[in-house]
Image (cartoon, rainbow, N blue to C red):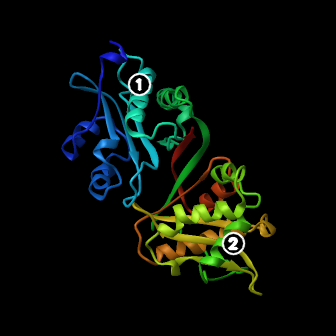
């Protein structure tokens, strides 16, 4: 069998979700709600079929009010299929679906894949991740960054209150944008570093605000600015809820105050804000290379949930 023998098509609608979900993935339980709320469209959810056998699948995602794909967050193949070139099947599916769905000549949306945090240590897990990455690479994509996802639950140790910092609400949009601009100086975040190669810090902060932080529907009164006793800002944290979970949406210590351990107190405050709301969990993420932030999450009682691979074209 060659890739040309496969039937590559979109799903017909929610009635084919059982078919689409034959390939296991942690996000499978979310897809029905995504379709109902407009975060996915049947026309963005593709399958590669060998007769009645699902060999591979693909899906883009967007925010509910958007009309164009924002992320490619599902690109899967049946890892038990030993009679086919799995990477070749994924490449064929990706090329076919992209040609039919995405604007010609544009830059495809970023590819995001949730992976086990220790995927390199397991032969089968390593092969599965590498095959998916290879398919993206064959279409011109490359690795941008690998990230770690964390989770705090009420069963985790309660974050302790520090004594060095004070916390107050963010005054307004102008203040938080100004703090974001300052925090971009020396940032370890790979997405921001890539954006800073062709944009100013003010432009990057404004775009981040527009695409993410202004979209949060949870109260901005949850957001906190950390200050010294004299009122000088040290950093900030934006506790919020995205489409799926309560999150630490953004956390930063300003450049002139880094290296003094303030991140622990800032993270503890953001965690306390959400904990007081009675949430069942808090999710957070940071780049694998941002070791100081990863260690801060671990010290605050956040368990490592998974890894994430991000690739761009």
Farthest residue to the bottom: give it. Answer: 230
| Residue beneath disc 1 | 92
Q: Quadrant of residue 77?
A: top left
The residue sitting at 65% across, 78% down in the picture is: 175
Residue 284 higher or lower than 223, as above or below = above
The N terminus lies in quadrant: top left
Q: Is residue 62 left or right of residue 22?
A: right
Residue 178 higher or lower than 61, as above or below = below
**Where residue 107 sits: x, y (%)?**
54, 41
> Which structural element holds mark 1?
helix
| Residue 300 is at least partly visible in this image | no
| Residue 116 is at least partly visible in this image | yes
Which marked residue is nearer to the observer: mark 1 or mark 2?
A: 1
> Which structural element holds mark 2?
helix
| Residue beneath disc 2 | 179
Farthest residue to the top: give it. Answer: 1
Could you classify mark 1 by the number of other residues whose Cα lies within 10 Å: few (under 14), some (14-19), or many (20 or more)? many
Between 298 and 137, the one lying in front of the other is: 137
Q: CA distance from mark 1 to mark 2?
A: 45 Å
Could you classify mark 2 by the number of other residues whose Cα lies within 10 Å: few (under 14), some (14-19), or many (20 or more)? many
Q: Are marks 1 and 2 in contact (CB under 8 Å)?
A: no
The C terminus lies in quadrant: top right
Farthest residue to the front: give it. Answer: 104
**Where residue 24 sits: x, y (%)?**
34, 38
**Where residue 102 sits: x, y (%)?**
43, 40
The residue sitting at 56% across, 30% down in the picture is: 140
**Where residue 53 sits: x, y (%)?**
25, 25
The residue sitting at 41% across, 53% down in the picture is: 62
Of callouts 1 and 2, the N-terminal one? 1
Between 193 and 202, the one lying in front of the other is: 202
Numbered badge on residue 16: none
């Amino acid at each position: 069998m060659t890739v040309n023998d496969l039937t590559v098509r979109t799903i017909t609608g929610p009635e084919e979700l059982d078919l689409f979900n034959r390939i296991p993935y942690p996000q499978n339980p979310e897809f029905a709600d995504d379709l109902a709320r407009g975060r996915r469209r049947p026309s963005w959810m593709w399958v590669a079929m060998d007769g009645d056998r699902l060999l591979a699948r693909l899906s883009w995602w967007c925010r509910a009010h958007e009309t164009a794909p924002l992320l490619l967050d599902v690109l899967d193949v049946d890892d038990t299929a030993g009679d086919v070139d799995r990477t070749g099947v994924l490449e064929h599916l990706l090329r076919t679906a992209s040609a039919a769905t995405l604007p010609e000549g544009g830059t495809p949306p970023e590819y995001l894949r949730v992976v086990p945090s220790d995927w390199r240590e397991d032969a089968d897990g390593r092969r599965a991740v590498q095959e998916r990455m290879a398919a993206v690479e064959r279409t011109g994509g490359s690795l941008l960054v690998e990230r770690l996802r964390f989770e705090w639950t009420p069963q985790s140790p309660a974050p302790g209150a520090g004594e060095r910092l004070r916390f107050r609400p963010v005054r307004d949009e102008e203040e938080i944008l100004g703090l974001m601009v300052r925090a971009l100086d020396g940032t370890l975040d790979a997405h921001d570093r890539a954006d800073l190669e062709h944009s100013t810090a003010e432009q990057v902060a404004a775009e981040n605000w527009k695409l993410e932080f202004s979209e949060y529907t949870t109260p901005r009164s949850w957001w906190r600015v950390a200050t010294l006793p004299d009122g000088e800002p040290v950093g900030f944290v934006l506790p919020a809820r995205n489409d799926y979970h309560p999150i630490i949406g953004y956390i930063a210590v300003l450049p002139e105050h880094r290296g003094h351990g303030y991140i622990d107190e800032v993270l503890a405050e953001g965690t306390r804000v959400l904990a007081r709301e009675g949430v069942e969990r808090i999710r957070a993420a940071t780049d694998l290379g941002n070791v100081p932030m990863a260690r801060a999450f671990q010290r605050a009682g956040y368990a490592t949930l998974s890894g994430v691979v991000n690739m761009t074209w």
